[in-house]
């Protein structure tokens, strides 16, 4: 496997800072690998990315609350992610874990007690929970108050949307549904996402640079982000996606990504909703 390029070492320099209580709803911690070795089933080789490295980014952006997302390179071994939550502090951090049907109810309750608030299905990077376990697993996590986070390719959305709409839990769609900007906002996949957002059950993460067909400075993402904000302003979330894993050419600059959010959500009320109020409701902060 080709190693990913490392995250940027310099602190971001955005043109604005998040309001008090701002939340990064999507990032990962990798390593140290002598304590938390990578899973042999992984599809990419990330560089180590430490808590200290992440806090340099968070402090520059004004991030005070954190949602640590289990990456595919750790499979269902959630120790690194949960360790990060404990070190950030349970008062301001929680986790999204990856499990499969080998986890019994006792194991799920243990994850809940350690700060896990949802489970992730990753249909892009592999090494995760098979989609055929979707209904059975969500039925088991519903009593725990967990939500489901789904990472998909855009072309999978139209077929999968009816299944997601019937699940007994809240559903969070990663990375703007994975719809490529070159396909346009009228693409069946993006329209399926907008229909899903018509339900009060479905949320979306505005981590949008991965859907860009044009690359830097990701200006082509704006119509998609604005359409999602117009459809469900009370169920849009944002995350850095730091340290931007599985990339092999250009790593985004986090201050620039934060400025993009500022362009999509220019008013103080919009920023308060996306960065503070919406995450507080979903993850139980504050």
Image: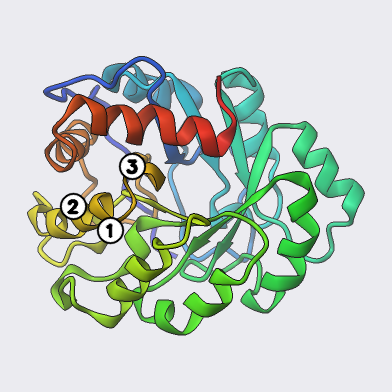
Question: Residue 74 at what x, y percent from top left?
Answer: 62, 52
Q: Quadrant of the C terminus?
A: top right
Disc on res. 6: 3
Q: Is residue 192 above or below residue 143?
A: below
State whether residue 101 appears in this view: yes
Say left or right for 275 vs 101: left
Instruction: Tell me the mark number nearer the camera, choosing from 1 and 2.
Output: 2
Q: Which residue is mark 2?
A: 226
Discs 3, 1 touching: Cβ within 8 Å: no
Q: Quadrant of the N terminus?
A: bottom left
The residue shown at (36%, 81%) is: 155
Q: Are marks 2 and 3 in contact (CB under 8 Å)?
A: no
In the displayed structure, would residue 211 be above or below residue 268?
below
Q: Residues within 10 Å of mark 1 (few under 14, many from 20)?
A: some
Q: Residue 280 appears at what percent x and percent y? A: 50, 30
Residue sitting at x 34%, y 16%: 59
Residue bearing mark 1: 210
Which of discs 3 and 1 lies nearer the camera? The answer is 1
Q: If you read the primary sequence from the N terminus, does the residue marked by circle 2 or circle 3 appear first?
A: 3
Q: Describe residue 102's horizontal placement relative to residue 232 as left or right.
A: right
* Local SS, label 3: loop
The image quadrant of residue 78 is top right
Q: Residues within 10 Å of mark 2 (few under 14, many from 20)?
A: some
Colour convention? rainbow
Which residue corresponds to the image point at 33% horizontal and 42% vertical from the top-left?
A: 6
* Point 19% across, 62% down: residue: 212
Q: Which mark is residue 18?
A: none
Check disc 2 and report its element: helix, strand or loop: helix
Marks 1 & 2, CB-CB < 8 Å contact: no
Q: Is residue 167 left or right of residue 5?
A: right
């Amino acid at each position: 496997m080709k190693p990913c390029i490392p995250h940027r070492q310099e602190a971001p320099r955005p043109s604005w800072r998040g309001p008090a209580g701002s939340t990064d709803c999507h990032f990962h911690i990798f390593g140290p690998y002598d304590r938390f070795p990578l899973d042999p089933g992984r599809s990419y080789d990330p560089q180590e990315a430490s808590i200290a490295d992440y806090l340099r980014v968070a402090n520059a952006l004004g991030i005070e609350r954190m949602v640590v997302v289990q990456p595919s390179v750790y499979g269902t071994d959630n120790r690194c992610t949960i360790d990060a939550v404990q070190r950030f502090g349970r008062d301001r951090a929680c986790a999204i874990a990856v499990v499969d049907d080998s986890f019994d109810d006792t194991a799920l309750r243990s994850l809940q007690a350690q700060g896990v608030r949802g489970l992730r299905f990753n249909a892009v990077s592999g090494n995760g929970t098979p989609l055929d376990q979707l209904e059975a697993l969500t039925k088991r996590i519903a009593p725990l108050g967990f939500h489901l986070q789904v990472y998909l390719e855009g072309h999978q959305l139209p077929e999968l949307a009816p299944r997601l709409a019937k699940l007994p839990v809240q559903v969070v769609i990663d990375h703007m549904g994975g719809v490529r900007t070159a396909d346009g906002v009228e693409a069946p996949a993006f329209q399926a996402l907008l229909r899903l957002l018509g339900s009060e059950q479905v949320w979306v993460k505005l981590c949008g640079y991965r859907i860009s067909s044009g690359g830097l400075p990701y200006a082509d993402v704006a119509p998609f982000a604005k359409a999602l904000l117009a459809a469900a302003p009370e169920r849009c979330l944002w995350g850095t996606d730091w340290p931007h894993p599985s990339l092999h050419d250009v790593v985004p600059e986090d201050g620039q990504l934060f400025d993009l959010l500022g362009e999509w959500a220019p008013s103080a009320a919009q920023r308060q909703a996306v960065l503070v109020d919406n995450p507080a409701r979903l993850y139980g902060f504050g």
